[in-house]
Amino acid sequence: MNFDLTEEHRMIREMSRDFADEVIEPRAEEMERTGEYPYDIYARMAELGMMGIPFPEDYGGSGGDWVGMHVCIEEIARGDITVAASLEVTTSVVGEELFAFGTEEQKQEWLVPIARGAQIGAFGLTEADTGSDAASLRTTARRDGDEWVLDGVKQFITNIGMDTSSMVIVAARTGIQKNGSPIISTFIVPKTAPGFSLGKRYEKMAWHASPTHEIILDHCRIPAANLLGDPERGFAQHLAALQTGRVSMAAMSVGLAQACLDASLKYAQERTQFGKPIFEHQAVSFKLADMAVAIELARNLMLKAAWLKDQKRKYMFEAAAAKLYASEIAEKAASDAVQIHGGYGCMDEYPVSRYYRSSKFLQIVEGTSEVQRMIIGRVLAGKM
Ligand SMILES: Cc1cc2nc3c(=O)[nH]c(=O)nc-3n(C[C@H](O)[C@H](O)[C@H](O)COP(=O)(O)OP(=O)(O)OC[C@H]3O[C@@H](n4cnc5c(N)ncnc54)[C@H](O)[C@@H]3O)c2cc1C
């Protein structure tokens, strides 16, 4: 076994780490306060090729792999979780679904600008009454001549509110199977399609610079050619893309937990109480030791899942386990980081207060911890 990153992966880590330290992290608190999306940061990430790491050069990428992508996402998340969230959705979920299931024409039209970072993609699955039980979605699509007509409302959609976002991949019912369950297909819906409109921007407790919107499809007409992949297997396609997304959410969680450890270790060595740095109090150093062990385990699990994907092997268990474990240890790390900072940890001038608010999202977005346990249970029972 070889646990070393390759030369290429090490270069990606170094590039992403320097960029996160020098460009992203110094702006993170201001971004959280204003809620303004940093288009300039994203443009520089595009120049560095970050959105195209796992895709072939023919499709606007750099011909790398998913281990490299996740090394990058972890470092970007260490700098700021909202920038990583945009990167994760556009590349690991939208880019991957287009790459895996799109026709050559769809890849050239939609994937190439996304992989180059010129445009950003969004993913539309969740509705008001269907989150974890996503297969019960209500949005419909019906064929009308050379077009599909979509009706429904999707909620909590990341990225779609950004000026640079071009489209959203939408899951919709297109019929009924013999067993009575719905046929779900997926569609590429351009933001410019007639009948598409952006609903409200949600006010959130954190991740302020990652815009989250409702989208309204009111007799929304798109060309027939915008059907993505197999019309009978749209839901399975969406789930396949979300499986990659789970690994990326794990990478984001590891990055956030690492930021908690870095900040807390520094603070514990500087802050003095009872005549010595608080690091010298065992209760504090044990918290840091536990945090470091948990991060190491989460990182290894996340990279193993990414590696399995690169080997084109099954990674359903590893993806769900990585998302579950990494997001739970990230929340614990953020809570301990605030504890180690004491009262200062509750003040916005210290980043750990932002880390604490941000960490909870990781256990919910792209499948809650309970859903990950359901997937793991089904894998154990041989049902997946
Ligand atoms: C910031 C943010 C960004 C998001 N971005 C996107 C996006 O870009 N695209 C998109 O489509 N969606 C997006 N989402 C939606 C997100 O994926 C869902 O919120 C998530 O999947 C949970 O669904 P829900 O909110 O409807 O919760 P529910 O499904 O209603 O769950 C509520 C609670 O019940 C639990 N629960 C439900 N079913 C079971 C069960 N069978 N057993 C045990 N417990 C259960 C859940 O685990 C949870 O704790 C985003 C959400 C947020 C907060």
Image (cartoon, helix red, strand yellow):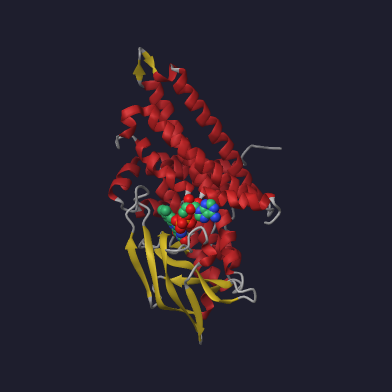
Viewer-nearest residue: 106 or 6: 106
Q: Quadrant of residue 4?
A: top right
Query: In this picture, is 66 found above or below 284?
Result: below
The percent coordinates of residue 210 (x first, y second) are 38, 53
Q: In this view, does 100 lie to the left or right of 37?
A: right
Quick one: quadrant of the N terminus? top right
Viewer-nearest residue: 79 or 364: 364
Query: In this picture, is 245 found above or below 152?
Result: above
Query: Which residue sits at x=50%, y=23%?
Result: 286
Q: In which quarter of the image is residue 25?
A: top left
Viewer-nearest residue: 53 or 214: 214
Q: Can residue 117 be seen in this view?
A: no
The percent coordinates of residue 255 (x first, y second) are 48, 41
Q: In this view, does 275 lie to the left or right of 186?
A: left
Farthest residue to the bottom: give it: 145
Q: How many marks?
A: 0
